[in-house]
Image (cartoon, helix red, strand yellow):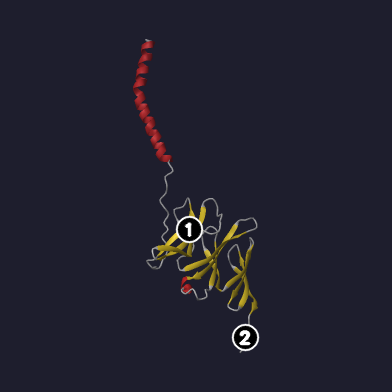
Amino acid sequence: MKATTFYLNIRRFNALLPLIAILLMAIGLAMGVLYTDTAPPPKSVIPPDQKESASSEVLELSKLDVELDLGPKLVMLKVVIRKKSGSDYSRSAIRNLVFLEDDSPDVKWVFPTQQQELVSVHPLKGSNGVIKGIYVEAVEKVDAVKSSEHKMRSIYLVSPDGTGYKKILTNVDEIISRRNDAKKLRLIYQTENSVRMAQIDMQDFQVTSDRELAKMNDLKK
């Protein structure tokens, strides 16, 4: 009797094996779909508030010329405008900067328009190597129509996480000296016939002083 019951249970178990296998396969497929790391859709890189540009101009994202360690998830790229010459495109001015995060669907544009040419982009680091801000010299596009004309610059400081920027100086002919530590940035610059020194707080990007160091007097006729 016991042997008969044993063999009966064996036959029942064997009959259930296909169903168990199908159930395990279904569970495996469900777990695979649940834990598969699907690629997110590409981030939108449509420039904000872009004015109409010539059909011979295109914008592209490129790596910065300087190395910036902004953390494991954040990277900053430059936006370069290319102008068509004949059948080829030649690389031209930097128009903007963008911040990308690998776990965010958004793109952070530093400047709200593409109407500036960035002539200098440099990280400002403390003594421990941590980036406190990003230094940018820019020329307004309307001021750079003719290459023969002198280009007055504006100086910006950008937050290292891309959350904002601040214009700290305008009408700058040339930056003569730039030094910074974790607390302040010191700029010696020339504007027209005056040499000035500005000091900027690196915590809030506020100009704490801006004074004249020397001035070239106009020659009397």
Q: Which of the two residues, 192 or 8, is positioned nearer the viewer here? A: 192
Q: Which of the two residues, 72 or 173, is positioned nearer the viewer here? A: 173
> Picture coordinates of residue 47 (x, y %)?
42, 62
Whether residue 210 is visible:
no
Which residue does the image show at 40% across and 39% down from the upper left? Answer: 33
Q: Identify whether 194 is placed above or below 5.
A: below
Which residue type carries mark 2?
Leu
Which residue does the image show at 41% across and 52% down from the upper left? Answer: 42
Q: Residues within 10 Å of mark 2 (few under 14, many from 20)?
A: few
Give the mark nearer the N terminus: 2 vs 1: 1
Q: Which of the two residues, 184 or 57, is positioned nearer the viewer here? A: 57
Image quarter in which the N terminus is found: top left
Where residue 23 sits, quadrant-wise, is top left
> Picture coordinates of residue 68 (x, y %)?
56, 56
Q: Which residue is mark 1?
A: 62
Q: What whole-number distance in Å separates the C-alpha atoms at marks 2 and 1?
A: 47 Å
> Picture coordinates of residue 123 (x, y %)?
58, 60
Q: Which of the two residues, 55 or 166, is positioned nearer the viewer here? A: 55
> Picture coordinates of residue 113 (x, y %)?
45, 66
Which residue type carries mark 1?
Ser
